[in-house]
Image: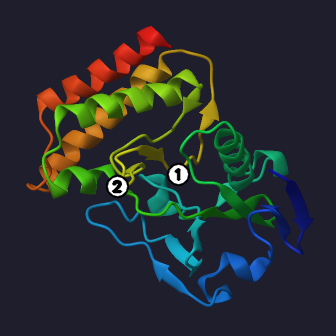
Amino acid sequence: MTESVEKTPSGAILYDRSVISEVSEERFTPSGWLHSEPVSGSLRSAGRGNTMYVGHVPRQFVLRHFVRGGLIGKLVRDSYAWTGEHNTRPFTEWRLLAKMADSGLRVPRPAAARYRRRGLIYTADIITVRIPGVQALSNFIAAERRESDFWFALGEAIQGFHAAGVFHADMNAYNLQIDAQGHLWMLDFDRGRLLPPGQWQQKTLSRLHRSLQKVRTLDAKVHFAKQDWDHLLEGYFDASKSA
């Protein structure tokens, strides 16, 4: 990973020349690419309408504009308080993704990140390499009922992230993605960090459990039952013992 920073009239762009050869302000808009399409998906798996696929196969990218969720998002959609370039959300996420990807964890490879500052606030964007053939866990378990081996392996994979100290601020059924081989990938590390072991591990598991229960109520096709969660925890704690 080779990190480069270029200043712009309103902020700066952080990028890896080995991943994305040309970077400019235009690359952070859909019109800056020959091809762009919105990320689609059922339930909330497509995000909040702030994410686009850009570029062409074989190497496509995911362009994401940072927007707020929850109640505050209804008042302030995409502005953040300025506390210095090093603390900006896109630069923090870019560097975390780079470190995790270099460590072999299944996360998107970061390509470029940008902030645009206006006085005491800024807006943010990030570009990552698209992972081929993944789908949100919510969609994966809606397609058909998954065997106990899948849930056990999912628990093992989550524990692998936790063993590496990876804290995901919103580990839910949408940010967990499954590839064609059934492997787990984690996406969207806004506010993510690397932490020593602690209560955050149980809290993120509880967050995922609530998310899975919620998607089951939103879509009758979602296959998720108590025994599935039990198998996930079995895989998680079995991996913890052997870590």
Residue type highlighted by circle 1: Asp
Left or right: where 134 falls relative to 189: left
Residue 86 visible in rendering: yes
Give the left or right position of residue 61, taking residue 155 as reference: right
Earlier sequence position, callout 1 versus callout 2:
2
Q: What x and y, as percent, mark residue 86?
A: 82, 46
Give residue 113's quadrant in the image.
bottom right
Front residue of 40/237: it is: 237
The residue wearing badge 2 is 136
What SS does tag 1 mark?
A: loop
Quick one: which residue is furthest to the top in this view? 241
Q: Is residue 82 above or below residue 230?
A: below
Q: Position of residue 200 (x, y in %)?
A: 49, 23
Q: Is residue 84 visible?
A: no
Looking at the image, which residue is at 69% across and 55% down?
90
Rounded to the nearest whole Å, what is the CA distance between mark 1 and mark 2?
12 Å
- Residue 201 located left or right of residue 96: left
Residue drawn at 54 percent across, 64 percent down: 130
Q: Secondary structure at mark 2?
A: strand
Q: Which mark is residue 135?
A: none
Q: Taking 167 as reference, is 190 above or below it?
A: below
Answer few, some or many: residues within 10 Å of disc 2's Cα (few below 14, many 20 plus, some between 14 and 19): many
All told, the count of numbered labels is: 2
- Using the image, tell me which numbered label, if any, was put on residue 188: 1
Where residue 132 appears, as percent x and y from the top left, is 47, 63
Q: Are marks 1 and 2 in contact (CB under 8 Å)?
A: no
